[in-house]
Image: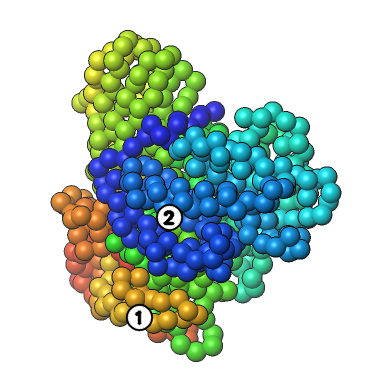
Amino acid sequence: MYGYFDPKGIRPCGWLKTQLKIQANGLAGNLNKIWPDVKDSAWIGGACEGWERVPYWLDGYIPLAYMLEDPEMITVAEKYVNTILDKQEDDGWICPCKPEERQKYDIWAFFLIGKVLVLYYEFTDSKKALKGLYKAMKCLHRYIVEERRIKLFDWGEHRWFEAMIPLQFLYSKHKEKWIFELASELRTQGTDYNNLKEHWKRPLNIWTQDTHVVNIAMMLKYESVCHQLLGYKLKNEAEDLWRHIEKYNGTAVGIFTGDECLSGLANNQGSELCSVVELMYSCEIIYAVTGKNVWADRLEKIAYNALPATVSDDMWTHQYDQLANQIACQIMPGPKVHFRTNSGQSHLFGLEPNFGCCTANFGQGWPKFAMSGFLKSRGGIIAAFMIPSELSTKIGGKKVRIKTETDYPFRMSCKYTVTADDPVEFTFKIRIPKWVIAFKVNGEEQKKSDYYKIHKTFFGKEEINIELITAPVLKTRQNGLKYLQYGALVFALPIEAEYIMHEYVKDGVERKFPYCDYELVPKSEWRYGFADETFEICEKEGDTYPFSSKNPRITVKAKMARVEWDYEDGYESISAKEPVSDRAISEARTMELIPYGCAKLRMTEMPKVKIKAK
């Protein structure tokens, strides 16, 4: 329904540009200097990992470099892509493995590097990248379709749909039969997730591809990336799948539990960081293809809550698993780990807690979100997300610029400035989130709708000021617990933390400041519940970090009271999933809740307490 603009015409502004700069100065922007699996990868002739980690990293590094117009980073991106292309075999094979190893090489990485080359081409128009992509996919066709020498297995079998992104792109350039043949064969060999729904109802402490949360986060977009190339009729299967997964594994911030496999509804189970950014990407694509606003609302909730929550303010460290009720991030002692299939260090903040896939992959979250701020519609432009950014494009050959100035989601207002050097007629639509009670345009209240639409001949400069009106609301979770949401932000009770730093070397990989590991030990009480539903919004100046854990830009004052709440049986740093009782054991007092994304230790799901009358 919608289409993407040329990313070369989109630039971040305001707090979003600040966030991208923080990322560029942090872990994702420096892995090529510090982390062997990127610095010395087999993809560029080194001896370290030669599968998914460099492509994962480039998938975020490339848009980050070009959107920030950073010369040094652009040089690095060019070096990696050109080295990979220079090492491509004459027959088109592009992944770093010996010829005799090809049949045992999981070609999920083949799909992933294909996506990267598409992304690189979109920012550079590189003919070399386009040629390399064509050769690589033609090679894959020969191995899979013509000669039947490779069959999908493991990750490739469960992520087959990722190949549709480079294949659809190639088909837009070369309408050749073999592209359709390869896509069809991958679909035939690939996992049909509609047959796995029963597996998602009851979490097990067993690792399987069928319940792996990252596979499932990626899978949601399969219909959207397949329908055009394979001629599918869109049946909105993603909605049915989403609701089913959410029913049995949902969280307060719109992601699914999975540490690493689906882990149920408990607020003390983890969610893998890879699943957060992949879920964002799936929502971006599904929204663009279907035009259904629910996917944009879901994306905002994930982007503004789950993503910043699991990465440190300076973006030098990250978690593998985040918890909704996260009272500590301490190494779990003993042989029995609370996480279903991950280690007892998975919720620490560090270089690569548990596995390095998230280290390489988390960098795609913010840059790809920034690329999605504006979308094409028939006859016009959609302001899909109120993120500070600027679009430069042409309509009917005439230049149009739209600038979005906002502190949303921390504030509820936004100014759009539309500039046209020559008269040009088009429709400009601004998406209005579902949770909005009412909204105003240039001071005038509007009838509630999914979009505010202007169709006119634009000429010169015109300002459109949007004010969103909403209120804080308690929403219900499992076991009758509540969480507080205001706009796109979920709020949590922050817990003071002592950071214990660990610098060490493991398997030849050094952890040292600023990319060392940290345990977070709680230093304040966490056993609270909501005493009433009276809330006060407090807008603040904040600091240099948009999602600052020390100085949030917005807080909510709430009446809270102590309740009796135990630890999870067998642990001293994991809260039980519900309190012993919802009866207050203290007087209610005013406390300040902060955005979930700002709170590294937090209580999010809490009871509505019963206070004994005096």
Horizontal and vertical percent for residue 30?
A: 37, 61
Quarter occupied by the C terminus: bottom left
Asked whether, in this view, residue 71 is left or right of residue 186, the answer is left
Q: Check the image and report above or below for 367 versus 330.
A: above
Asked whether, in this view, residue 154 is left or right of residue 146, the answer is left
In this rendering, the count of numbered labels is 2
Q: Residue at x 76, y 32 (%)?
A: 177
Mark 2 and mark 1 in contact (Cβ < 8 Å)?
A: no
Instruction: Give the residue number, with chain letter if any, for mark 2.
Output: 363
Q: CA distance from mark 1 to mark 2?
A: 23 Å
Q: Which quadrant holds residue 262? A: bottom right
Callout 1 secondary element: loop
Q: Residue at x 45, y 31 (%)?
A: 6
Q: Check the image and report above or below for 67 versus 177.
A: below
Asked whether, in this view, residue 312 is left or right of residue 334, the answer is left
The foreground one among 43 and 579 is 43
The amino acid at mark 1 is: Glu
Horizontal and vertical percent for residue 595?
A: 29, 57
Horizontal and vertical percent for residue 501?
A: 31, 79
Say few, some or many: other residues with alpha carbon within 10 Å of mark 1 (under 14 / 14 to 19 / 20 or more). Answer: some
Q: Which of pointers 1 and 2 lies earlier in the amino acid sequence? A: 2
The foreground one among 379 and 394 is 394
The amino acid at mark 2 is: Gly
Residue projecting furthest to the left: 541
Note whether residue 214 is visible.
yes
Horizontal and vertical percent for residue 613?
A: 24, 69
Q: Which mark is residue 484?
A: none
Q: Residue at x 34, y 21 (%)?
A: 400
Note whether residue 265 is visible.
no
Instruction: Give the residue number, with chain letter if any, for mark 1.
Output: 503
Residue projecting furthest to the right: 147
